[in-house]
Image: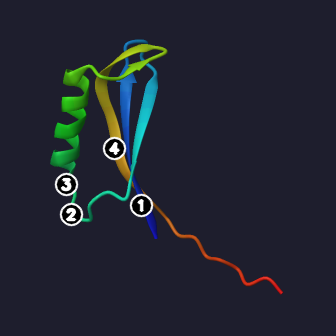
Amino acid sequence: MDKTLTMVFKNAAGRNVSLSVAAPREDLTGAEVAQAMKDLIDGDIFITSGGDLVEIAAARIVSREVVELELE
């Protein structure tokens, strides 16, 4: 099963901006993700078309299961 950590921020224009990370650690906590998101905002390293990242909006781990079909 493929897993992706999706972090959602608000930019200066008030729009959502998503940053995804493949294969997050299994024991990842919400507190660790929140701290990493705060660090990204404070580091001011990402600029979007709507300006800098200014606020944490959400975070989620998305699981996706892929089943290959046998073709005859």
Q: State how many labels appear.
A: 4
The secondary element bearing badge 3 is classed as: loop
Task: Work out which residue is located at the far front of the displayed protein and give it.
Answer: 45
Q: Residue 39 at what x, y percent from top left?
A: 19, 31
Q: Which mark is residue 29?
A: 3
Q: Which mark is residue 70?
A: none
Sequence-first tag of 4 and 3: 3
CB-based contact (under 8 Å), mark 1 and mark 2? no
Amino acid type of the residue that numbered disc 4 sits on in the rendered structure: Ala
| Among numbered discs 2 and 4, the one appearing first in the sequence | 2
Q: Residues within 10 Å of mark 3 (few under 14, many from 20)?
A: few
Residue underneath mark 4: 59
Q: Marks 3 and 2, how far apart in space?
A: 6 Å
Q: Which residue is mark 2?
A: 27
Task: Categorize mark 2 by other alpha carbons within 10 Å: few (<14), some (14-19), many (20+).
Answer: few
Marks 3,2: beta carbons within 8 A? yes
Question: Which residue sits at x=44%, y=27%?
Answer: 16
Q: Residue at x 46, y 14 (%)?
A: 50
What's the CA distance linking mark 4 and mark 3? Answer: 11 Å
Mark 1 residue type: Lys
**Of the image marks 1 and 2, the number of the one nearer the N terminus:** 1
Q: Where does residue 56 sit, x and y in percent of width and height?
A: 29, 30
32 over 56 or under it: above or below: below
Q: Earlier in the sequence, mark 4 or mark 1?
A: 1
Q: Secondary structure at mark 1?
A: strand
First in residue order: circle 3 vs circle 1: 1
How far apart are labels 1 and 2 at the CA level? 13 Å
Q: Badge 1 is on which residue? A: 3
Marks 3 and 1, how far apart in space?
15 Å
Q: CA distance from mark 2 to mark 4?
A: 15 Å
